Image (tube, rainbow, N blue to C red):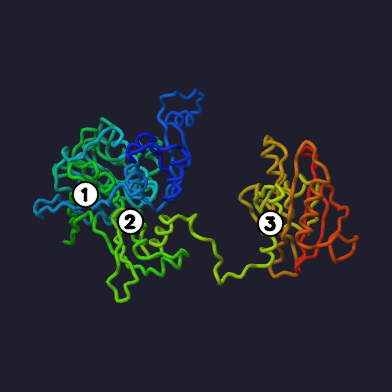
Amino acid sequence: MPTVSVGRDRLFEALGRTYTQEEFEELCFDFGVELDDVTTEKAVIRKEKHLEEEAGEDEEVIYKIEVPANRYDLLCLEGLAQALRIFMGLDEIPKYIVSNIPSESLLKMHVKPETSLIRPYVVCAVLRGVTFDEARYNSFIDLQDRLHQNICRRRTLVAIGTHDLDAIEGPFTYEALPPTDINFVPLKQVKSFRADELMEFYKTDLKLKKFLHIIEKSPVFPVIYDRNRTVLSLPPIINGAHSAISLQTKNVFIECTATDLTKAKIVLNIMVTMFSVYCERKFHVEPVEVVYSDGKSNVLPDLSVFNLEVPLSYITGSIGVSLDLNQVSSLLNKMQLQAERSVSVDGRSIVVSVPPTRSDVLHACDVMEDVAIAYGFNKIPKRKPVSLKPVALNQISDLIRLEIAMNGFTEVLTWILCSYKENFSMLNRKDDKSTAVIIGNPRSTDFEIVRTSLMSGILKTVGHNKDHPKPIKIFEVGDISVLDETKDVGAKNQRQLAALYCGANSGFELIHCLVDRIMEVVGTPFVPIGDDKGYYIRRSNVSFHFTLHFLCCCYLLRVWSCHTYNLAC
Protein backbone atom coordinates (compact mmCIF):
# COMPACT_ATOMS: atom_id res chain seq x y z
CA MET A 1 0.00 0.00 0.00
CA PRO A 2 1.20 3.56 -0.67
CA THR A 3 2.85 5.54 2.11
CA VAL A 4 2.15 9.26 2.49
CA SER A 5 4.78 11.44 4.19
CA VAL A 6 3.34 14.47 6.00
CA GLY A 7 4.79 16.95 8.46
CA ARG A 8 3.59 16.11 11.97
CA ASP A 9 3.19 19.71 13.16
CA ARG A 10 1.31 20.80 10.03
CA LEU A 11 -0.96 17.75 10.26
CA PHE A 12 -1.73 18.42 13.91
CA GLU A 13 -2.45 22.06 13.06
CA ALA A 14 -4.94 20.92 10.40
CA LEU A 15 -6.55 18.51 12.89
CA GLY A 16 -6.92 21.27 15.48
CA ARG A 17 -4.94 19.63 18.29
CA THR A 18 -1.74 17.79 19.11
CA TYR A 19 -1.45 14.07 19.80
CA THR A 20 1.08 11.82 21.43
CA GLN A 21 2.45 9.19 19.07
CA GLU A 22 0.37 6.50 20.81
CA GLU A 23 -2.81 8.57 20.53
CA PHE A 24 -2.23 9.23 16.84
CA GLU A 25 -1.47 5.56 16.16
CA GLU A 26 -4.78 4.67 17.79
CA LEU A 27 -6.63 7.26 15.70
CA CYS A 28 -5.05 5.90 12.53
CA PHE A 29 -5.99 2.34 13.46
CA ASP A 30 -9.60 3.34 14.14
CA PHE A 31 -9.79 5.06 10.75
CA GLY A 32 -8.26 2.15 8.86
CA VAL A 33 -4.78 3.53 8.11
CA GLU A 34 -1.45 2.93 9.84
CA LEU A 35 1.37 5.10 11.12
CA ASP A 36 4.21 3.24 9.45
CA ASP A 37 7.25 5.27 10.53
CA VAL A 38 8.31 8.45 12.31
CA THR A 39 11.37 10.21 10.91
CA THR A 40 12.62 13.62 9.77
CA GLU A 41 13.12 15.04 6.30
CA LYS A 42 16.85 15.48 6.87
CA ALA A 43 17.10 11.91 8.17
CA VAL A 44 15.56 10.65 4.94
CA ILE A 45 18.11 12.66 2.93
CA ARG A 46 20.96 11.37 5.10
CA LYS A 47 19.77 7.80 4.59
CA GLU A 48 19.57 8.25 0.81
CA LYS A 49 23.08 9.74 0.71
CA HIS A 50 24.49 7.26 3.28
CA LEU A 51 25.57 10.05 5.63
CA GLU A 52 26.13 9.55 9.36
CA GLU A 53 25.56 13.05 10.67
CA GLU A 54 23.75 13.42 13.98
CA ALA A 55 20.15 14.61 13.94
CA GLY A 56 19.47 18.19 15.00
CA GLU A 57 16.83 19.20 17.51
CA ASP A 58 15.13 21.61 15.09
CA GLU A 59 14.40 19.01 12.39
CA GLU A 60 10.77 18.71 11.36
CA VAL A 61 9.18 15.39 12.35
CA ILE A 62 7.71 13.47 9.40
CA TYR A 63 4.90 10.93 9.80
CA LYS A 64 4.81 8.18 7.17
CA ILE A 65 1.22 6.96 7.01
CA GLU A 66 0.23 3.85 5.10
CA VAL A 67 -3.12 4.28 3.34
CA PRO A 68 -5.28 1.92 1.25
CA ALA A 69 -4.19 1.76 -2.38
CA ASN A 70 -7.65 2.75 -3.68
CA ARG A 71 -8.11 5.76 -1.37
CA TYR A 72 -6.67 8.37 -3.71
CA ASP A 73 -8.19 11.12 -1.57
CA LEU A 74 -5.75 10.24 1.24
CA LEU A 75 -2.58 10.73 -0.82
CA CYS A 76 -2.02 14.28 0.44
CA LEU A 77 -2.15 16.09 3.76
CA GLU A 78 -5.26 18.05 2.74
CA GLY A 79 -7.30 14.93 2.02
CA LEU A 80 -5.98 13.02 5.02
CA ALA A 81 -6.69 15.86 7.45
CA GLN A 82 -10.16 16.41 6.01
CA ALA A 83 -11.03 12.72 6.25
CA LEU A 84 -9.81 12.47 9.87
CA ARG A 85 -11.69 15.62 10.93
CA ILE A 86 -14.91 14.27 9.42
CA PHE A 87 -14.26 10.89 11.07
CA MET A 88 -13.90 12.60 14.47
CA GLY A 89 -17.05 14.67 13.89
CA LEU A 90 -15.23 17.99 13.70
CA ASP A 91 -16.33 18.88 10.14
CA GLU A 92 -19.29 18.28 7.88
CA ILE A 93 -18.91 16.46 4.58
CA PRO A 94 -17.97 19.19 2.04
CA LYS A 95 -20.14 19.86 -0.98
CA TYR A 96 -18.12 20.47 -4.12
CA ILE A 97 -19.63 22.87 -6.64
CA VAL A 98 -18.93 23.24 -10.34
CA SER A 99 -19.23 26.95 -11.11
CA ASN A 100 -22.18 27.86 -13.29
CA ILE A 101 -20.58 29.60 -16.29
CA PRO A 102 -22.36 30.44 -19.56
CA SER A 103 -21.37 28.20 -22.44
CA GLU A 104 -19.87 31.06 -24.46
CA SER A 105 -17.61 32.00 -21.53
CA LEU A 106 -16.29 28.48 -20.88
CA LEU A 107 -12.65 27.75 -21.55
CA LYS A 108 -12.42 25.19 -24.34
CA MET A 109 -10.00 22.41 -25.21
CA HIS A 110 -10.21 21.29 -28.86
CA VAL A 111 -9.03 17.73 -29.51
CA LYS A 112 -7.55 16.88 -32.92
CA PRO A 113 -8.32 13.46 -34.46
CA GLU A 114 -4.60 12.52 -34.67
CA THR A 115 -4.48 12.13 -30.88
CA SER A 116 -6.33 8.82 -31.25
CA LEU A 117 -3.02 7.37 -32.49
CA ILE A 118 -1.33 7.79 -29.12
CA ARG A 119 -3.32 9.32 -26.18
CA PRO A 120 -6.92 9.93 -27.25
CA TYR A 121 -8.41 11.56 -24.14
CA VAL A 122 -7.98 14.82 -22.27
CA VAL A 123 -9.92 16.32 -19.36
CA CYS A 124 -9.46 19.79 -17.85
CA ALA A 125 -10.52 22.09 -15.00
CA VAL A 126 -9.58 25.44 -13.45
CA LEU A 127 -8.98 26.44 -9.82
CA ARG A 128 -9.58 30.19 -9.41
CA GLY A 129 -8.20 32.39 -6.67
CA VAL A 130 -5.83 29.81 -5.18
CA THR A 131 -3.57 30.94 -2.35
CA PHE A 132 -0.29 29.01 -2.24
CA ASP A 133 2.41 29.04 0.39
CA GLU A 134 5.49 26.84 0.29
CA ALA A 135 3.89 23.94 2.16
CA ARG A 136 0.69 24.01 0.06
CA TYR A 137 2.70 24.27 -3.16
CA ASN A 138 4.87 21.28 -2.22
CA SER A 139 1.80 19.28 -1.28
CA PHE A 140 0.22 20.13 -4.64
CA ILE A 141 3.29 18.84 -6.51
CA ASP A 142 3.59 15.76 -4.27
CA LEU A 143 -0.02 14.78 -4.92
CA GLN A 144 0.65 14.76 -8.66
CA ASP A 145 3.67 12.50 -8.15
CA ARG A 146 1.75 10.08 -5.92
CA LEU A 147 -1.14 9.87 -8.37
CA HIS A 148 1.34 9.27 -11.20
CA GLN A 149 2.82 6.35 -9.28
CA ASN A 150 -0.56 4.96 -8.23
CA ILE A 151 -3.70 5.14 -10.37
CA CYS A 152 -1.83 6.67 -13.34
CA ARG A 153 0.48 3.64 -13.51
CA ARG A 154 3.63 5.72 -13.92
CA ARG A 155 1.94 8.02 -16.44
CA THR A 156 1.08 5.21 -18.87
CA LEU A 157 -2.67 5.62 -18.23
CA VAL A 158 -2.89 9.27 -17.17
CA ALA A 159 -0.46 12.20 -17.11
CA ILE A 160 -1.20 15.39 -15.15
CA GLY A 161 -0.19 18.87 -16.26
CA THR A 162 -0.69 22.01 -14.15
CA HIS A 163 -0.25 25.54 -15.53
CA ASP A 164 -0.46 29.18 -14.52
CA LEU A 165 -3.63 30.23 -16.34
CA ASP A 166 -2.63 33.91 -16.27
CA ALA A 167 0.43 33.12 -18.41
CA ILE A 168 -1.54 31.43 -21.20
CA GLU A 169 -4.67 32.16 -23.21
CA GLY A 170 -7.51 29.91 -24.35
CA PRO A 171 -8.95 28.25 -26.27
CA PHE A 172 -6.48 25.36 -26.14
CA THR A 173 -5.81 22.58 -28.63
CA TYR A 174 -4.69 19.02 -27.98
CA GLU A 175 -2.80 17.69 -30.99
CA ALA A 176 -0.52 14.86 -32.11
CA LEU A 177 2.38 15.97 -34.32
CA PRO A 178 5.66 14.54 -35.61
CA PRO A 179 8.38 15.19 -33.00
CA THR A 180 10.37 17.36 -35.43
CA ASP A 181 7.42 19.78 -35.62
CA ILE A 182 7.28 20.40 -31.86
CA ASN A 183 9.63 23.01 -30.45
CA PHE A 184 9.50 24.61 -26.98
CA VAL A 185 11.40 25.43 -23.78
CA PRO A 186 10.74 22.63 -21.25
CA LEU A 187 10.30 23.12 -17.53
CA LYS A 188 13.47 24.14 -15.64
CA GLN A 189 15.38 24.76 -18.90
CA VAL A 190 16.33 27.98 -20.68
CA LYS A 191 16.89 26.81 -24.27
CA SER A 192 14.40 25.53 -26.78
CA PHE A 193 14.36 21.86 -27.82
CA ARG A 194 12.71 19.91 -30.60
CA ALA A 195 10.70 17.01 -29.19
CA ASP A 196 13.07 14.39 -30.67
CA GLU A 197 16.06 16.25 -29.20
CA LEU A 198 14.27 16.32 -25.86
CA MET A 199 13.99 12.51 -25.87
CA GLU A 200 17.77 12.24 -26.16
CA PHE A 201 18.32 14.98 -23.59
CA TYR A 202 16.21 13.27 -20.92
CA LYS A 203 17.79 9.82 -21.35
CA THR A 204 20.29 10.88 -18.68
CA ASP A 205 17.64 12.36 -16.36
CA LEU A 206 17.08 10.02 -13.41
CA LYS A 207 13.44 11.05 -12.94
CA LEU A 208 12.16 11.50 -16.49
CA LYS A 209 14.02 8.80 -18.42
CA LYS A 210 11.68 6.10 -17.10
CA PHE A 211 8.73 7.75 -18.89
CA LEU A 212 10.33 8.18 -22.31
CA HIS A 213 9.37 4.70 -23.51
CA ILE A 214 5.67 5.65 -23.43
CA ILE A 215 5.88 7.82 -26.57
CA GLU A 216 9.46 7.79 -27.97
CA LYS A 217 8.76 5.12 -30.61
CA SER A 218 5.51 6.73 -31.80
CA PRO A 219 5.50 8.59 -35.13
CA VAL A 220 3.54 11.40 -33.46
CA PHE A 221 3.87 12.98 -30.00
CA PRO A 222 0.94 14.47 -28.03
CA VAL A 223 1.20 18.20 -27.39
CA ILE A 224 -1.05 20.90 -25.93
CA TYR A 225 -1.04 24.48 -27.34
CA ASP A 226 -2.76 27.63 -26.24
CA ARG A 227 -4.31 30.22 -28.53
CA ASN A 228 -0.91 31.73 -29.34
CA ARG A 229 0.67 28.33 -30.17
CA THR A 230 2.58 28.35 -26.91
CA VAL A 231 3.33 24.79 -25.79
CA LEU A 232 1.74 23.99 -22.45
CA SER A 233 3.01 20.43 -22.20
CA LEU A 234 4.41 17.42 -23.99
CA PRO A 235 2.51 14.69 -22.14
CA PRO A 236 3.40 12.44 -20.45
CA ILE A 237 6.99 13.74 -20.29
CA ILE A 238 7.30 17.41 -19.34
CA ASN A 239 5.44 20.72 -19.10
CA GLY A 240 6.53 23.92 -20.82
CA ALA A 241 8.49 26.50 -18.86
CA HIS A 242 6.23 29.34 -20.05
CA SER A 243 3.19 28.21 -18.01
CA ALA A 244 5.01 26.89 -14.92
CA ILE A 245 3.15 27.48 -11.65
CA SER A 246 4.79 29.20 -8.67
CA LEU A 247 3.93 30.48 -5.21
CA GLN A 248 2.49 33.61 -6.85
CA THR A 249 0.11 31.65 -9.11
CA LYS A 250 -3.55 32.49 -8.45
CA ASN A 251 -5.38 30.63 -11.21
CA VAL A 252 -4.39 27.05 -12.01
CA PHE A 253 -5.27 25.27 -15.25
CA ILE A 254 -5.21 21.48 -14.84
CA GLU A 255 -5.15 19.09 -17.80
CA CYS A 256 -4.97 15.30 -17.74
CA THR A 257 -4.20 13.39 -20.94
CA ALA A 258 -4.97 9.69 -20.90
CA THR A 259 -5.46 6.35 -22.54
CA ASP A 260 -8.17 5.55 -19.97
CA LEU A 261 -10.95 8.15 -19.76
CA THR A 262 -12.45 6.82 -16.51
CA LYS A 263 -9.15 7.05 -14.66
CA ALA A 264 -8.52 10.50 -16.12
CA LYS A 265 -11.82 11.74 -14.65
CA ILE A 266 -10.95 10.24 -11.25
CA VAL A 267 -7.51 11.88 -11.25
CA LEU A 268 -8.96 15.27 -12.24
CA ASN A 269 -11.60 15.03 -9.51
CA ILE A 270 -8.99 14.23 -6.87
CA MET A 271 -6.77 17.13 -7.93
CA VAL A 272 -9.52 19.75 -7.86
CA THR A 273 -11.37 18.52 -4.75
CA MET A 274 -8.22 18.31 -2.62
CA PHE A 275 -7.03 21.83 -3.45
CA SER A 276 -10.28 23.72 -4.00
CA VAL A 277 -10.14 24.22 -0.22
CA TYR A 278 -7.52 26.94 -0.92
CA CYS A 279 -9.65 28.73 -3.53
CA GLU A 280 -11.12 32.14 -2.92
CA ARG A 281 -14.56 30.51 -3.20
CA LYS A 282 -14.00 27.38 -1.13
CA PHE A 283 -14.83 24.07 -2.85
CA HIS A 284 -15.78 25.81 -6.13
CA VAL A 285 -14.24 24.52 -9.36
CA GLU A 286 -14.46 26.08 -12.82
CA PRO A 287 -15.27 23.63 -15.63
CA VAL A 288 -13.65 23.38 -19.07
CA GLU A 289 -15.40 22.16 -22.20
CA VAL A 290 -13.53 19.47 -24.17
CA VAL A 291 -14.59 19.50 -27.83
CA TYR A 292 -13.75 16.51 -30.07
CA SER A 293 -13.33 16.58 -33.83
CA ASP A 294 -16.56 14.64 -34.36
CA GLY A 295 -18.57 17.42 -32.70
CA LYS A 296 -19.05 15.69 -29.35
CA SER A 297 -18.14 17.62 -26.22
CA ASN A 298 -17.85 17.10 -22.48
CA VAL A 299 -17.93 19.69 -19.72
CA LEU A 300 -15.68 18.56 -16.89
CA PRO A 301 -15.07 17.98 -14.05
CA ASP A 302 -18.16 16.06 -12.99
CA LEU A 303 -18.40 16.56 -9.23
CA SER A 304 -21.89 15.17 -8.81
CA VAL A 305 -22.61 12.45 -6.27
CA PHE A 306 -24.04 9.10 -7.27
CA ASN A 307 -26.54 7.18 -5.17
CA LEU A 308 -26.17 3.57 -4.14
CA GLU A 309 -29.02 1.68 -2.46
CA VAL A 310 -27.88 -0.94 0.03
CA PRO A 311 -30.10 -3.28 2.09
CA LEU A 312 -29.59 -2.91 5.83
CA SER A 313 -29.68 -6.69 6.20
CA TYR A 314 -26.68 -7.03 3.87
CA ILE A 315 -24.59 -4.63 5.98
CA THR A 316 -25.47 -6.07 9.38
CA GLY A 317 -25.38 -9.67 8.17
CA SER A 318 -21.96 -9.33 6.57
CA ILE A 319 -20.43 -7.57 9.57
CA GLY A 320 -22.16 -9.71 12.18
CA VAL A 321 -23.56 -6.95 14.38
CA SER A 322 -27.06 -5.62 14.96
CA LEU A 323 -27.41 -1.98 13.87
CA ASP A 324 -30.44 0.14 13.04
CA LEU A 325 -30.72 2.58 10.15
CA ASN A 326 -29.79 5.60 12.23
CA GLN A 327 -26.65 3.94 13.55
CA VAL A 328 -25.54 2.87 10.06
CA SER A 329 -26.19 6.37 8.71
CA SER A 330 -24.12 7.92 11.50
CA LEU A 331 -21.23 5.52 10.88
CA LEU A 332 -21.28 6.21 7.13
CA ASN A 333 -21.22 9.96 7.73
CA LYS A 334 -17.92 9.46 9.59
CA MET A 335 -16.52 7.92 6.38
CA GLN A 336 -17.69 10.86 4.17
CA LEU A 337 -20.72 8.96 2.86
CA GLN A 338 -24.10 10.63 3.39
CA ALA A 339 -26.92 8.15 3.95
CA GLU A 340 -30.66 8.34 4.36
CA ARG A 341 -33.55 5.91 4.56
CA SER A 342 -34.71 4.46 1.26
CA VAL A 343 -38.21 5.28 0.02
CA SER A 344 -38.72 1.61 -0.95
CA VAL A 345 -41.79 -0.23 0.28
CA ASP A 346 -40.11 -2.09 3.15
CA GLY A 347 -37.97 0.89 4.18
CA ARG A 348 -35.18 -1.46 5.25
CA SER A 349 -32.58 -0.09 2.83
CA ILE A 350 -30.41 3.00 2.87
CA VAL A 351 -29.46 5.27 0.00
CA VAL A 352 -25.79 6.22 0.15
CA SER A 353 -24.58 9.38 -1.62
CA VAL A 354 -21.02 8.80 -2.81
CA PRO A 355 -18.99 12.04 -3.25
CA PRO A 356 -16.45 12.58 -6.07
CA THR A 357 -13.60 12.02 -3.61
CA ARG A 358 -14.63 8.41 -2.94
CA SER A 359 -14.06 6.74 -6.30
CA ASP A 360 -13.26 3.53 -4.39
CA VAL A 361 -16.94 3.01 -3.51
CA LEU A 362 -18.42 0.96 -6.35
CA HIS A 363 -20.57 -1.72 -4.73
CA ALA A 364 -22.60 -2.48 -1.63
CA CYS A 365 -19.61 -4.37 -0.20
CA ASP A 366 -17.61 -1.13 -0.18
CA VAL A 367 -20.33 0.54 1.88
CA MET A 368 -20.40 -2.42 4.25
CA GLU A 369 -16.61 -2.20 4.67
CA ASP A 370 -16.81 1.48 5.61
CA VAL A 371 -19.51 0.73 8.20
CA ALA A 372 -17.24 -1.96 9.68
CA ILE A 373 -14.28 0.44 9.84
CA ALA A 374 -16.31 3.18 11.49
CA TYR A 375 -17.88 0.70 13.93
CA GLY A 376 -14.45 -0.69 14.86
CA PHE A 377 -13.09 -4.07 13.83
CA ASN A 378 -12.08 -4.84 17.41
CA LYS A 379 -15.69 -4.38 18.55
CA ILE A 380 -17.05 -6.98 16.12
CA PRO A 381 -17.69 -10.25 17.99
CA LYS A 382 -15.81 -13.29 16.77
CA ARG A 383 -17.96 -16.06 15.35
CA LYS A 384 -17.58 -19.10 13.18
CA PRO A 385 -19.72 -19.22 10.05
CA VAL A 386 -22.29 -22.01 10.15
CA SER A 387 -21.02 -23.30 6.83
CA LEU A 388 -17.47 -23.67 8.17
CA LYS A 389 -16.54 -27.24 9.01
CA PRO A 390 -13.10 -27.22 10.64
CA VAL A 391 -10.59 -29.90 9.69
CA ALA A 392 -9.72 -32.17 12.61
CA LEU A 393 -5.99 -31.89 11.93
CA ASN A 394 -6.19 -28.08 12.06
CA GLN A 395 -8.21 -28.21 15.27
CA ILE A 396 -5.65 -30.32 17.13
CA SER A 397 -2.83 -28.19 15.67
CA ASP A 398 -4.45 -25.04 17.10
CA LEU A 399 -4.90 -26.69 20.49
CA ILE A 400 -1.23 -27.71 20.55
CA ARG A 401 -0.17 -24.19 19.54
CA LEU A 402 -2.19 -22.72 22.40
CA GLU A 403 -0.78 -25.15 24.95
CA ILE A 404 2.84 -24.56 23.92
CA ALA A 405 2.30 -20.79 23.97
CA MET A 406 0.95 -21.08 27.54
CA ASN A 407 4.21 -22.85 28.43
CA GLY A 408 6.13 -19.73 27.54
CA PHE A 409 7.18 -20.51 23.96
CA THR A 410 6.80 -18.03 21.08
CA GLU A 411 5.46 -19.27 17.76
CA VAL A 412 7.41 -18.56 14.58
CA LEU A 413 6.32 -18.96 10.98
CA THR A 414 9.03 -19.80 8.48
CA TRP A 415 9.01 -20.41 4.72
CA ILE A 416 7.94 -23.85 3.56
CA LEU A 417 10.54 -23.46 0.80
CA CYS A 418 14.24 -23.39 1.71
CA SER A 419 17.64 -23.84 0.15
CA TYR A 420 19.09 -27.28 -0.55
CA LYS A 421 22.01 -26.54 1.76
CA GLU A 422 19.80 -25.51 4.69
CA ASN A 423 17.74 -28.69 4.45
CA PHE A 424 20.65 -31.12 4.25
CA SER A 425 24.30 -30.21 4.81
CA MET A 426 23.62 -27.52 7.41
CA LEU A 427 21.62 -30.09 9.39
CA ASN A 428 24.29 -32.77 8.92
CA ARG A 429 21.93 -34.82 6.76
CA LYS A 430 22.42 -36.54 3.42
CA ASP A 431 19.99 -36.43 0.51
CA ASP A 432 18.72 -39.92 -0.24
CA LYS A 433 17.18 -38.65 -3.51
CA SER A 434 13.83 -40.17 -2.55
CA THR A 435 12.51 -37.77 0.10
CA ALA A 436 12.80 -34.11 -0.81
CA VAL A 437 10.57 -32.35 -3.34
CA ILE A 438 12.88 -30.32 -5.60
CA ILE A 439 11.73 -27.07 -7.23
CA GLY A 440 12.33 -27.00 -10.98
CA ASN A 441 14.19 -23.91 -12.25
CA PRO A 442 14.11 -21.97 -8.93
CA ARG A 443 14.30 -18.18 -9.14
CA SER A 444 16.52 -17.99 -6.05
CA THR A 445 18.95 -20.25 -4.21
CA ASP A 446 16.99 -19.46 -1.05
CA PHE A 447 13.98 -21.42 -2.35
CA GLU A 448 15.25 -24.60 -4.00
CA ILE A 449 13.31 -27.38 -2.28
CA VAL A 450 10.27 -27.98 -0.08
CA ARG A 451 11.44 -28.47 3.49
CA THR A 452 11.50 -32.01 4.89
CA SER A 453 11.93 -30.78 8.47
CA LEU A 454 10.94 -27.73 10.47
CA MET A 455 14.31 -27.56 12.19
CA SER A 456 16.10 -25.62 9.47
CA GLY A 457 13.57 -22.78 9.81
CA ILE A 458 13.68 -22.36 13.58
CA LEU A 459 17.47 -22.77 13.74
CA LYS A 460 17.73 -20.05 11.09
CA THR A 461 15.39 -17.88 13.20
CA VAL A 462 17.69 -18.25 16.22
CA GLY A 463 20.71 -17.53 14.04
CA HIS A 464 19.21 -14.21 12.94
CA ASN A 465 18.27 -13.34 16.55
CA LYS A 466 21.37 -14.49 18.41
CA ASP A 467 21.63 -11.10 20.14
CA HIS A 468 18.16 -11.54 21.62
CA PRO A 469 18.11 -11.88 25.42
CA LYS A 470 18.32 -15.49 26.57
CA PRO A 471 16.59 -17.82 26.97
CA ILE A 472 15.04 -18.11 23.53
CA LYS A 473 12.00 -20.39 23.49
CA ILE A 474 10.37 -20.80 20.07
CA PHE A 475 8.23 -23.36 18.29
CA GLU A 476 6.52 -23.95 14.96
CA VAL A 477 3.62 -26.12 13.91
CA GLY A 478 3.57 -26.50 10.14
CA ASP A 479 3.65 -28.75 7.12
CA ILE A 480 6.60 -30.41 5.48
CA SER A 481 6.46 -32.29 2.18
CA VAL A 482 7.97 -35.63 1.14
CA LEU A 483 7.87 -37.67 -2.04
CA ASP A 484 5.20 -40.40 -2.18
CA GLU A 485 4.63 -42.38 -5.35
CA THR A 486 1.23 -43.57 -4.11
CA LYS A 487 -0.19 -40.05 -4.33
CA ASP A 488 -1.53 -38.65 -7.59
CA VAL A 489 0.74 -35.60 -7.29
CA GLY A 490 3.78 -37.66 -6.31
CA ALA A 491 4.14 -36.09 -2.85
CA LYS A 492 2.32 -35.66 0.44
CA ASN A 493 2.25 -33.16 3.28
CA GLN A 494 2.90 -34.02 6.92
CA ARG A 495 2.08 -31.82 9.91
CA GLN A 496 5.00 -31.48 12.33
CA LEU A 497 5.89 -29.70 15.54
CA ALA A 498 9.36 -28.34 16.28
CA ALA A 499 10.35 -26.62 19.52
CA LEU A 500 13.67 -25.08 20.48
CA TYR A 501 15.08 -23.84 23.77
CA CYS A 502 18.30 -21.81 23.74
CA GLY A 503 19.86 -20.58 26.95
CA ALA A 504 22.93 -20.62 29.15
CA ASN A 505 21.61 -23.58 31.19
CA SER A 506 19.63 -25.46 28.57
CA GLY A 507 19.26 -29.17 29.15
CA PHE A 508 17.45 -32.21 27.85
CA GLU A 509 14.84 -32.02 30.60
CA LEU A 510 13.67 -28.56 29.47
CA ILE A 511 12.47 -29.80 26.10
CA HIS A 512 11.46 -33.23 27.44
CA CYS A 513 8.99 -31.69 29.88
CA LEU A 514 7.33 -29.83 26.98
CA VAL A 515 6.86 -33.13 25.14
CA ASP A 516 5.37 -34.75 28.23
CA ARG A 517 2.98 -31.81 28.68
CA ILE A 518 1.78 -32.04 25.08
CA MET A 519 1.18 -35.78 25.45
CA GLU A 520 -0.71 -35.21 28.70
CA VAL A 521 -2.97 -32.60 27.11
CA VAL A 522 -3.87 -34.77 24.10
CA GLY A 523 -4.48 -37.75 26.39
CA THR A 524 -1.71 -39.98 25.09
CA PRO A 525 0.03 -42.15 27.76
CA PHE A 526 3.72 -43.00 27.91
CA VAL A 527 4.25 -46.64 26.83
CA PRO A 528 7.18 -49.00 26.28
CA ILE A 529 9.01 -48.83 22.96
CA GLY A 530 7.09 -50.59 20.21
CA ASP A 531 3.65 -50.24 21.86
CA ASP A 532 1.26 -48.40 19.51
CA LYS A 533 -1.23 -47.43 22.24
CA GLY A 534 0.64 -44.33 23.34
CA TYR A 535 3.93 -42.54 22.84
CA TYR A 536 7.51 -43.56 23.46
CA ILE A 537 10.94 -42.01 23.08
CA ARG A 538 13.77 -43.70 21.23
CA ARG A 539 17.14 -42.69 19.87
CA SER A 540 16.91 -41.25 16.37
CA ASN A 541 19.20 -42.30 13.56
CA VAL A 542 19.59 -38.60 12.72
CA SER A 543 22.35 -37.01 14.79
CA PHE A 544 20.72 -33.73 15.79
CA HIS A 545 17.22 -34.72 16.88
CA PHE A 546 15.13 -37.51 18.26
CA THR A 547 11.76 -38.59 16.89
CA LEU A 548 8.65 -39.11 18.93
CA HIS A 549 5.59 -40.92 17.59
CA PHE A 550 2.09 -40.89 19.01
CA LEU A 551 -1.32 -41.94 17.79
CA CYS A 552 -4.17 -39.53 18.47
CA CYS A 553 -7.58 -38.86 16.89
CA CYS A 554 -6.75 -41.26 14.08
CA TYR A 555 -3.96 -38.92 12.86
CA LEU A 556 -0.35 -40.03 13.05
CA LEU A 557 1.61 -36.89 13.94
CA ARG A 558 5.36 -36.64 14.07
CA VAL A 559 6.79 -34.37 16.74
CA TRP A 560 10.36 -33.27 16.11
CA SER A 561 12.17 -31.75 19.05
CA CYS A 562 15.58 -30.12 19.36
CA HIS A 563 17.74 -29.86 22.46
CA THR A 564 20.39 -27.15 22.33
CA TYR A 565 23.44 -26.20 24.36
CA ASN A 566 24.48 -22.60 23.75
CA LEU A 567 23.23 -22.68 20.14
CA ALA A 568 25.12 -25.95 19.46
CA CYS A 569 22.82 -28.79 18.51
Q: Residue at x 43, y 58 (%)?
A: 372
Q: Residue at x 74, y 60 (%)?
A: 482
Q: Which residue is mark 1?
A: 125
Picture quarter with the C terminus? top right
Q: Looking at the picture, how far across and down is residue 479, in whole percent?
A: 69, 58
Q: Is residue 551 above or below residue 202?
A: below
Question: Which disc number belongs to residue 478?
Answer: 3
Does dot 2 land on a helix, a strand or a loop?
A: helix
Residue neighbourhood size for the residue with mark 2, other residues' Cα within 10 Å, grouped as few (<14), some (14–19), many (≥20): many
Q: Residue at x 56, y 66 (%)?
A: 384
Report whether residue 548 is seen: yes
Q: Earlier in the sequence, mark 1 or mark 3?
A: 1
Q: Looking at the picture, how far across and down is residue 197, in whole percent?
A: 31, 38
> Is label 2 in contact with label 3 (beta carbons under 8 Å)?
no
Number of the front mark, 2 or 1: 2
Which quadrant holds residue 289?
A: bottom left
Does dot 1 land on a helix, a strand or a loop?
A: strand
- Describe residue 280's horizontal placement relative to residue 355 as left or right: left
Camera-side residue: 218 or 390?
390
Q: Amino acid at mark 1?
A: Ala
Q: Amino acid at mark 3?
A: Gly
Q: CA distance from mark 2 to mark 3?
A: 44 Å
Q: CA distance from mark 1 to mark 3?
A: 56 Å
Q: Which residue is mark 2?
A: 333
Which quadrant holds residue 199?
A: top left
